[in-house]
């Protein structure tokens, strides 16, 4: 029972005399009630005092600008504001990260929870927090207080699993972003080992990791930096263009008197701007393909009540950790107990034949959080380069620009040193000490591009060896595992555009980032036209469709019928023949030219025509009638409906080389294609005496259907119309829609 601090305690007394023992218990009962109440009152009071030190200004797009004296107080306000905008997404990320998803979703999610605990148990998260420097502990406390104060002031919001947030929760972040490295480890393989005690052959397991589905929209991002030599103003420019699930990251601005003044995208529940800028520097992360995790096959034998694994000339004890997980069921909350296993290589995640396999990844949460937060407060390249020496940003590349005119690119950051005699693209023999990681590569040993003669840098989840055109790093100068990245059509597109730019303005940079050309079809469509010439008796539909392509400029747009045909042909080609990425010379082995059976190519085109006619009644349909944007609810798993309002979109899939990626597909019970990933938060930034930026979000800032900011950027998104960012306090106040302290709204 909770009693408000100003509410008198009322005791009901009857006229029946109490028994002597109850009479003596009354004072003790009073003391117990007040003893329980006092810590709660003290905590709420401390939150209220903290809230008084924080000001939140919502601008005309609902973007929160948080102002506070200390970094920790700013984080307090930052998390409170995030919860206001979409508590369910904050909640969902931490339910997943802390390994409690099965309590929400049931037994099937147990192996996601087991995976989380394999790499960090609750006890280990608490220990990591205790080992963190005091300034980071204070920030983590600000994080927890911000969420808890939101829940305290919004009793109508009922948490689904986590009723209280703790300062050690952020330790579950692997390297600054929810998900990251750990999501590459297959829960199905974990299930096979820990549930069924089953080992499979290597051919059945592949490399034990989760790889992108070739039929799904490629995930990743674009980062572009422009040197002063190519800009109209003589200032450096940066394009921040994450390609994520829509509504994965909101827009936010957080300011303290301790030097924090960061603006950009924050993953729900994070306490730092993940991709963004401050007054002097900007940073954009793109997913990397460098090899930063390895699998070690362990020879294990049973000894007494435990296990040992071979290592060199010795046998070492396998660490055993008991774990009890809860899961929801129709019968209520159930429990399941596991014994987790670890070697010095890492947790045992699966089994290949008779060998246990330990999967080693980067897991240094304290330093990862230090790096991620420190990054947001730096003022120049020198400080940024020093920060990179922490080397915990494993799954990302970084594109950088600053107010001094520097532009830079870091291909990864966490790169294990390995003996080149071994093939680490496959599981290696864990019993051989020579396969152990030999520390980490220094940043200076990794692929870094600084102020190239091209005066531009790009990375679109593509090879670093085209990052600066002819002034890019050379492949032969680095070990293969440092950059196994292939080229993709977004990378090709970016290089083509940047090789011709001059006098770039902020607006020109946005135009460049939305260029409608699709280089994949410059390769695919000629293959189709060549195949058509070999057809002896083409159908009327095929002939008419081919005619549409003959004068096509390979550009997308809402009115383009060619775009509709090309998309469906490209998907059919990918499913039946192979990835169009194989047509890129950079990706071809020994320059081998690919040949295709003309009948297969024609069949792929005819399948596309049939699908369009079945779904829409005709193949002759403009792209904007097929390709749509729709936001009906704030649900994490969004519903889509062909019978409800949606907007036509001229953007296209990143798989075709679209700079502005729009990952659309038919959803459950729909025929039209609805975007659910790609361009989400986008910002273009110019650094000078004062920083200037423009930004755009898919839909809007709020996840609340009733908010005016739920979809106030939807039409802007469809048209590619960016809003001016309010960065300086005077500009924020001019555009203020609401100013308040946490708890008063």
Image (cartoon, grey):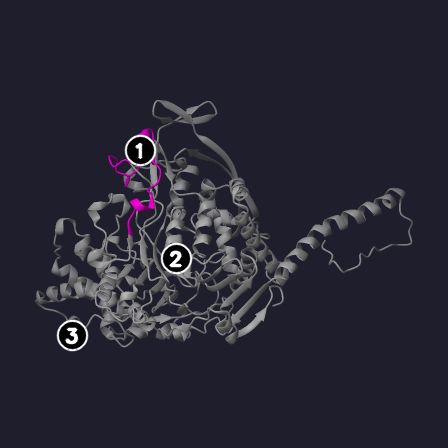
Residue, x 75% and y 48% (percent of image)? 35
How far apart marks 1 and 2 lie (CA) works out to 38 Å
Of marks 1 and 2, which one's residue comes earlier in the chain?
Answer: 2
Helix, strand or loop for disc 3: loop
The mark found on residue 551 in the picture is: 3
Helix, strand or loop for disc 2: loop
Check whether the beta carbons of the residues at disc 1 and disc 2 lie within 8 A of each other. no
Query: What span is colored magenta in the figure?
Result: 419-448
Dividing the picture into quadrants, the one containing residue 739 is bottom right
Few, some or many residues within 10 Å of mark 3 (<14, 14–19, 20+): few
Per the picture, the main secondary structure of the magenta-coloured stretch is loop
Quick check: is 428 in the magenta stretch? yes
Residue highlighted by disc 1: 435
Of marks 3 and 2, which one's residue comes earlier in the chain?
Answer: 2
Dividing the picture into quadrants, the one containing residue 582 is bottom left
How far apart marks 3 and 2 lie (CA) works out to 49 Å
């Amino acid at each position: 029972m909770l009693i408000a601090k100003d509410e008198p305690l009322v005791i009901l007394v009857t006229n029946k005399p109490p028994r002597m023992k109850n009479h003596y218990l009354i004072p003790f009962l009073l003391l117990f009630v007040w003893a329980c109440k006092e810590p709660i009152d003290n905590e709420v009071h401390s939150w209220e005092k903290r809230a008084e030190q924080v000001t939140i200004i919502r601008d005309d797009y609902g973007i929160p600008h948080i102002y506070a004296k200390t970094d920790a107080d700013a984080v307090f306000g930052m998390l409170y504001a995030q919860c206001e905008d979409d508590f369910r997404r904050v909640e969902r990320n931490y339910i997943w990260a802390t390994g409690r998803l099965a309590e929400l979703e049931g037994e099937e999610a147990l192996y996601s929870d087991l995976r989380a605990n394999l790499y960090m148990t609750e006890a280990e998260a608490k220990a990591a927090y205790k080992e963190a420097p005091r300034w980071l502990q204070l920030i983590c406390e600000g994080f927890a207080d911000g969420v808890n104060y939101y829940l305290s002031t919004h009793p109508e919001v009922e948490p689904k699993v986590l009723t209280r947030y703790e300062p050690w929760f952020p330790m579950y972040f692997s390297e600054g972003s929810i998900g990251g490295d750990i999501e590459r480890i297959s829960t199905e393989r974990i299930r096979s080992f820990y549930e069924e005690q089953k080992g499979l052959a290597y051919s059945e397991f592949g490399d034990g990791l989760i790889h992108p589905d070739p039929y799904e929209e490629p995930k990743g991002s674009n980062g572009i930096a422009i040197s002063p030599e190519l800009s109209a103003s003589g200032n450096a420019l940066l394009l921040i263009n994450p390609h994520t699930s829509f509504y994965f990251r909101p827009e936010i601005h957080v300011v303290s008197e301790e030097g924090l003044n960061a603006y950009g995208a924050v993953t729900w529940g994070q306490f730092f701007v993940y991709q963004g800028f401050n007054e002097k520097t900007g940073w954009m992360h793109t997913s990397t393909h460098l090899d930063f995790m390895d699998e070690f096959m362990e020879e294990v034998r049973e000894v007494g009540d435990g296990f040992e694994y071979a290592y060199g000339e010795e046998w070492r004890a396998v660490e055993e950790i008991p774990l009890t997980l809860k899961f929801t069921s129709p019968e209520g909350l159930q429990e399941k107990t596991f014994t987790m296993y670890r070697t010095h290589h890492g947790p045992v995640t699966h089994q290949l034949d008779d060998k246990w396999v330990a999967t080693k990844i980067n897991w240094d949460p304290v330093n990862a959080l230090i790096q991620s937060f420190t990054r947001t407060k730096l003022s120049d390249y020198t400080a940024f380069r020093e920060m990179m020496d922490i080397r915990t940003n494993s799954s990302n590349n970084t594109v950088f620009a600053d107010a001094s005119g520097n532009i830079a690119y870091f291909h990864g950051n966490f790169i294990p040193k390995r003996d080149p005699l071994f093939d680490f693209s496959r599981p290696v023999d864990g019993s051989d000490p020579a396969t152990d990681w030999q520390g980490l590569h220094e940043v200076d040993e990794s692929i870094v591009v600084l102020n190239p003669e091209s005066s531009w840098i790009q990375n679109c989840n593509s090879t670093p060896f085209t990052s600066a055109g002819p002034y890019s790093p050379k492949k032969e100068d680095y070990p293969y595992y440092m950059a196994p990245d292939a080229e993709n059509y977004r990378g090709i597109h970016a290089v083509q555009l940047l090789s011709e730019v001059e006098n770039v303005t902020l607006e020109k940079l946005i135009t460049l980032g939305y260029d409608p050309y699709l280089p994949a079809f410059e390769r695919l469509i000629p293959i189709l036209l060549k195949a058509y010439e070999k057809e002896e008796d083409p159908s009327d539909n095929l002939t008419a469709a081919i005619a549409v392509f003959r004068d096509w400029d390979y550009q997308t747009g809402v009115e383009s019928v060619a775009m509709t045909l090309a998309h469906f042909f490209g998907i059919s080609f990918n499913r039946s023949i192979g990835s169009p990425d194989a047509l890129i010379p950079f990706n071809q082995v020994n320059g081998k030219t690919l040949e295709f059976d003309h009948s297969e190519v024609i069949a792929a085109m005819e399948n596309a025509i049939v699908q369009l006619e079945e779904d829409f009644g005709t193949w002759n349909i403009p792209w904007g009638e097929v390709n749509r944007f729709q936001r009906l609810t704030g649900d994490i798993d969004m519903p889509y409906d062909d019978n409800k309002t949606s907007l036509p979109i001229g953007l296209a899939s990143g798989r075709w080389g679209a700079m502005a990626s729009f990952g659309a597909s038919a959803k459950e019970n729909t025929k039209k294609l609805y975007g659910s990933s790609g361009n989400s938060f986008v910002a273009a930034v110019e650094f000078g005496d004062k920083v200037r930026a423009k930004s755009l979000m898919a839909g809007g800032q709020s996840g609340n259907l009733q908010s005016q900011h739920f979809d106030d950027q939807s039409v802007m998104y469809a048209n590619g119309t960016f809003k001016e960012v309010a960065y300086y306090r005077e500009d924020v106040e001019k555009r203020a829609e609401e100013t308040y302290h946490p708890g008063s709204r």
